[in-house]
Image (spheres, grey):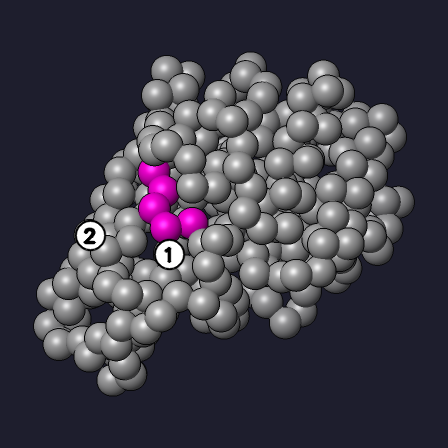
Amino acid sequence: MAKYLVTGGTGFIGHNLTHKLVNMGHEVIITGSATELSVPNVTTLECHLTGINFKRIGKIDGCFHQAGNNQTTSLDKEEMMTANLHAAKTLFDRLFHDHECKKIVYASSASIYGNGQIPYEETNTPNPLSFYAESKLAFDEWIQNQNLNAVGLRYSNVYGPFEHHKKNRASMISKILHDIQKNKSVKLFKYGEQKRDWIFVDDCTESNLFFMNSTYQGIVNCGSGEQTSFNEIVKICEEQLDKKASVEYIDCNMNQEYQANNQLCMKKSNTLGFHPKTSVRSGISQILKQEKD
């Protein structure tokens, strides 16, 4: 049994990861918010990264760093850098130097690739289109200059059950699914043919666990390696709900900062030994089953 810290443990990915660790028999401490998802049988520090009481953490074997500002459309660059760069740097410094942490696996982002040539490889020249992407890239670059035992997973459109607390930050799959269920119009940017590389949250969780236990350190993509358009997502949701959707195509108001299509090259991850397993169709089916249960 090991002892882990999960920052953002009450958030979507952190919540799933924490449950997995507890079920495996590990001791877990999490940071998070009472307004998000509760996790039983863990020590919860209700705080943001800048307010962590490090005395309550003690020695840990590893950290899964999921916390941060993920409001991708935010125009507050200073706040974004404070949360995703400066506070994260302090966290890593304290954990490695004061808490005998052996390894950290953290949430990076495929947004750093921007609208470059797909599929995105880890060696692609970055082209961040938002302050969020800039902050994630800045932290990746800092880590690579520190020679720390850490792995940055460049997440690509993570989705899964129980995203409701995220509200407007929930995945488009979650939004489309629940709009159809509630007889609401599904709003897509014209004309719904933008494509995304979607990864089911269980695969994302397994990637975190895999790289925590690997000898690898550095950056690696975390996606499915496949593309699915928004129109295709609507069709799959219609089929699984046996219900016709009302789709409204609207103008995109985000101009140059909008990442029209993305797809990750998963060759590096596959070579290292991790292979995502869940198709989009299977993932949507699991959302319906788990949220019904």
Element type where label 1 sits in the image: loop
- Answer whether residue 105 is magenta in the image: no
Judging by the rendered image, the residue that carries numbered circle 1 is: 160
Depth order, front residue of 293/126: 126
Element type where label 2 sits in the image: helix
Measuring 72% from the left and 28% from the top, which residue is drawn there? 142
- In the rendering, at what x and y percent does residue 241 appear? 16, 71
Q: Name the residue furthest bottom.
A: 183
- In the rendering, at what x and y percent does residue 102 appear? 70, 23
Identify residue type, mark 2: Arg
Where 101 falls versus 167 (above or below)?
A: above
Q: Quadrant of the C terminus?
A: bottom left
Depth order, front residue of 201/231: 231
Q: Using the rendered view, name the quadrant where residue 137 is placed.
A: top right
Circle number at residue 281? 2
Which secondary structure type mostly characterizes the magenta part of the structure? loop
Measuring 62% from the left and 61% from the top, which residue is drawn there? 74
Magenta-drawn segment: 259-263
- Answer whether residue 260 is magenta in the image: yes
- 198 left or right of 2 in image: left
* Residue 277 seen anywhere in this rendered image of the structure: yes
Where 156 falls versus 232 (above or below)?
A: above
Q: Using the rendered view, name the quadrant where residue 223 is placed.
A: top left
- In the rendering, at what x and y percent does residue 266 appear? 36, 27
Measuring 25% from the left and 84% from the top, which residue is drawn there? 183
